[in-house]
Amino acid sequence: DTSQQQITMTAVRRLQAHHQAIYALATANDRLASGSDDHTVKLWNPFAQDPAAQLLATINTGAKVWALAMSGDLLVSGGAGNAVSNVNVWSLRGIGTFHAAGSVRSAVRLASLRGMPEQGVRSLAFDGDRVVAGADDGRLYVW
């Protein structure tokens, strides 16, 4: 009976750039985003064999990052500690899936979403049109 067989997997790559715990991951368009308590989102090419080509960009969010969601070239970050908004939408247009000298561009903050109390955001969903945030106050916030 093959339903009882255990599958063993081995890590093929280790991506390292954060300085504190990583709480959030999201993928889209062959890019990987990781969010951390170090107030950054790192964008990666998880398929690059050369370590110098793995890190595509760093976004300084100004807050701890506990949740991420991606759709196409848009990234939504959520967390705690940002005086303006704990939920932000970023454009990743121009940040490709490979790194070549001089080709890396920064993400652009498109929006800081308002309308929720100063609660931490623990989860996000994003379909390209609507953002839903799950907050520490036990509520869902929809934009």
Image (cartoon, rainbow, N blue to C red):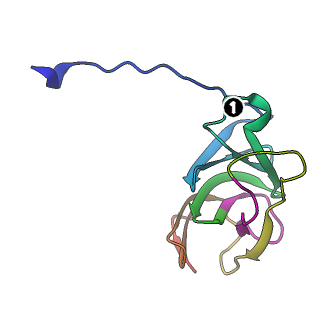
Q: Residue 117 location in percent, x, y?
A: 68, 73
Disc count in the image?
Answer: 1
Q: Quadrant of the N terminus?
A: top left
Foreground residue among 99 and 129: 99
Which quadrant of the figure has residue 59?
A: bottom right
Foreground residue among 135 and 34: 34
Q: For the residue labelled by badge 1, is the local secondary structure a helix, a strand or a loop?
A: loop
Q: Is residue 91 magenta?
A: yes
- Which residue is at a point 56% across and 23% down the rendered structure image? 12
User: Would residue 18 be seen by someone viewing this image from the given angle?
Assistant: no
Q: Is residue 87 magenta?
A: yes
User: Would residue 28 be seen by someone viewing this image from the given angle?
Assistant: yes
Vertical comparison of 78 with 50: above or below: below
In the shown orientation, is residue 124 left or right of residue 75? left
Residue assigned mark 1: 15
User: Which amino acid is tagged 1?
Assistant: Leu
Magenta span = 77-96
Label 1, residues with CA under 10 Å away: few <14, some 14-19, many ≥20? few
Q: Quadrant of the C terminus?
A: bottom right
- Which residue is at a point 61% across and 56% down the rendered structure image? 68
In the shown orientation, is residue 26 left or right of residue 18? left
Q: Residue 122 location in percent, x, y?
A: 58, 56
Vertical comparison of 95 with 100: above or below: below
Which quadrant of the figure has residue 48?
A: top right
Which quadrant of the figure has residue 69?
A: bottom right
Foreground residue among 83 and 100: 100
- Which residue is at a point 67% across and 39% down the rendered structure image? 22
Q: Residue 56 location in percent, x, y?
A: 76, 47
Vertical comparison of 64 with 18: above or below: below
Work out which residue is located at the far right of the displayed protein and give it.
Answer: 102
- Which residue is at a point 67% across and 64% down the rendered structure image? 119
